[in-house]
Image (tube, grey):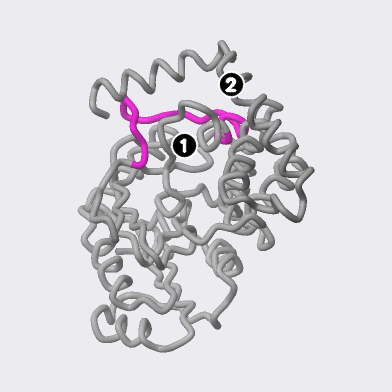
Amino acid sequence: MTTSSVWLDIFLLCHNRPEFAKASIQSILDQNTGGFRLTVSDNSSDERVARMVQENFPEVRIKRRSNLPSLVHFNTCIAEAQADYFCLFHDDDLMGKNYVNEMRLAKEQYPDAVAVGANAWVVNVEKNTRALSIRALGSHQVISSAKNLFRYYFGRYQTGIAPFPGYIYRTTVAGNARIPIDGGKYADVSWLLRLASLGFVIWLNKPLMDYHMHGGNDGMQESRRDRLTFLAFIKRNPFCVSATGLSDYRYFIYRKFIATNVDCITYPERNRRMRLFVRWQRVRRHLRILEIPAMLRKKMLKLLGK
């Protein structure tokens, strides 16, 4: 494959999981079309991943990092993207055989999209379950703004999101952006919101990958600080959220704080105010007429078994 025929840079971000990475690399190499360049970005603290790649995939390019903080690792790969589009895939996920081809068709249909996200089968390793990340009708969804994207994450009656590892990004736009390294576990959402403010985003409803959930998932270890950090981000950046969206997010995090009795003894007045907000917001959400179409769509999808 010549360099000129490469339209997609795939960075496989690895950290100390050689067996997971081996399966992920194989799933990428098994694509039913070309046009991509795979780089294993090994950010491990030991040499196991590097040895595995050398022994099993000697033809695959590997870049050895220096055990960087995870978000710095992401940004390092973004800075190295040279093709027209790039993908930041995770070492514990599997790429469907038609991922690259479907993404190529999508970017040709929507060349001005800043990013294209893929639906996925969410596989819970511990519970041995498998479910779609997005439940929707049609071939794709067009997300026209950052506020619209925010609604898909935290609004009421939503039907799922495209997992972060499944996106491809247009390098001329996203290649100049960086994930905020102080953004906590919601840093990826912060970055996507910034990109959605620069252009529209496409979500493909066809599942094109397996997204694995297990005890080792970095995203499974979310904290109160992460949620409050993201709250501070959206308050500083009103371009990405409406007043309704801000209330929805506060409702989302306050319910979690109350459920875990966060600070209910040390800060009883703060806890009381959170409970009052949640009660009032629960009533307001039921009165939103504009959410009726979303409610009906979700009920229809349930009736259709989606």
Residue 160: mark: none
Badge 1 marks a residue whose secondary structure is loop
Q: Position of residue 87 (x, y in %)?
A: 44, 56
Left or right of 106? Residue 243 is: right
Residue at the image position 37 percent from the left and 67 percent from the top: 91
Query: Which residues, given as a range, are shown in magenta?
Result: 133-150
Residue 120, visible in the rendered structure? yes
Amino acid type at mark 1: Pro
Of badges 1 and 2, nearer the viewer stands 2
Q: Is residue 211 magenta?
A: no
Residue at the image position 49 percent from the left and 49 percent from the top: 169
Q: Is residue 144 magenta?
A: yes
Amino acid type at mark 2: Arg
Badge 2 marks a residue whose secondary structure is helix
- Residue on which disc 2 sits: 285
Inter-mark Cα distance, 1 to 2: 37 Å
Residue at the image position 53 percent from the left and 66 percent from the top: 77
In this rendering, the answer to whether 68 lies above or below 93 is below
Q: Residues within 10 Å of mark 1 (few under 14, many from 20)?
A: few
Residue 111: mark: 1
Q: Residues within 10 Å of mark 2 (few under 14, many from 20)?
A: some
Q: Position of residue 7 (x, y in %)?
A: 40, 53
Q: Position of residue 227 (x, y in %)?
A: 63, 50
Left or right of 70? Residue 12 is: left
Residue 173, visible in the rendered structure? no
Q: Quadrant of the N terminus?
A: bottom left
In this rendering, the answer to whether 140 lies above or below 86 is above
Q: Position of residue 296 (x, y in %)?
A: 40, 15
